[in-house]
Image (cartoon, grey):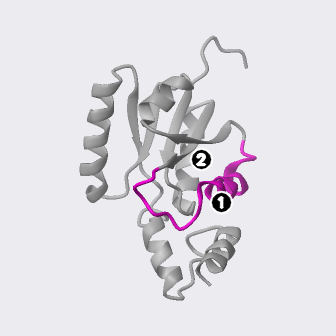
Amino acid sequence: MNRLKQRRALYPGSFDPVTFGHIDLIDRARKTFDRVFVAVAVNSEKKPLFSVEERVKLLKQAVGKKKGVVIDTFDGLMVDYARSKKLGIIIRGLRATSDFDYEFQMALTNRLLAEDIDTMFLMPSEKHFYISSRLIKEIAQLGGDVSRFVPPFVKRALSEQLS
């Protein structure tokens, strides 16, 4: 399909670890965009369970073979990364009203930093609506079964990381 301008978007996050909710949002974004850059944020302020390299590896296993998905990392401002890749849309997932306040603030701040970049909010399916990486890590740390929330290789990685 020849197009003068490819529709491309950025889906940034910590992905610590990648969940079925993340995968669902990536699949939803692929319906609208030709290319979805899934970028792991490098944030020295946070103490992730998995290293950046491990998170990239898990993402590549989860979605790296899907058409139009590019896995990458970024350090610094999200809008600077988006500009460097010529991406005009940032995709953010909304699960609940508690997400909305933070995401709305971030979207408005990003708009002030980069008027040419818009934010698109996507909701995961009702099946994955309540999933968060933080809760999954907590369940795994307490010995609970996370197989309904993450792919088998992520479950194994959590088990190995927490043992």
* Residue lying at 51% horizontally and 83% vertically, measured from the top left: 141
| Number of the label disc, if any, that sits on residue 97 | none
Residue 90 % position (x, y) = 45, 35
Q: Is residue 4 left or right of residue 139?
A: right
Q: Nearer the viewer, residue 122 or 81?
A: 81
* Amino acid marked by disc 1: Glu
Q: Which of marks 1 and 2 is nearer the N terminus?
A: 2
Q: Name the residue under label 1.
A: 54
Farthest-out residue, front: 44
* Amino acid marked by disc 2: Asp
Residue 47 % position (x, y) = 46, 63
Question: Compared to 131, does 32 lie above or below?
Answer: above
* Residue lying at 45% horizontally and 51% vertically, measured from the top left: 43
Magenta region includes residue 64: yes
- Screen quadrant of the C terminus: bottom right
Residue 55 appears anywhere in the view:
yes
Question: Compared to 69, does 136 lie above or below?
Answer: below
- Screen quadrant of the N terminus: top right
Name the secondary structure under disc 1: helix
Q: Specify start and end residues of the magenta stretch as a single range.
A: 43-66
Q: Is residue 51 left or right of residue 152?
A: left
Q: Which of 82 and 132 is in front in this view?
A: 82
Q: Name the residue under label 2.
A: 27
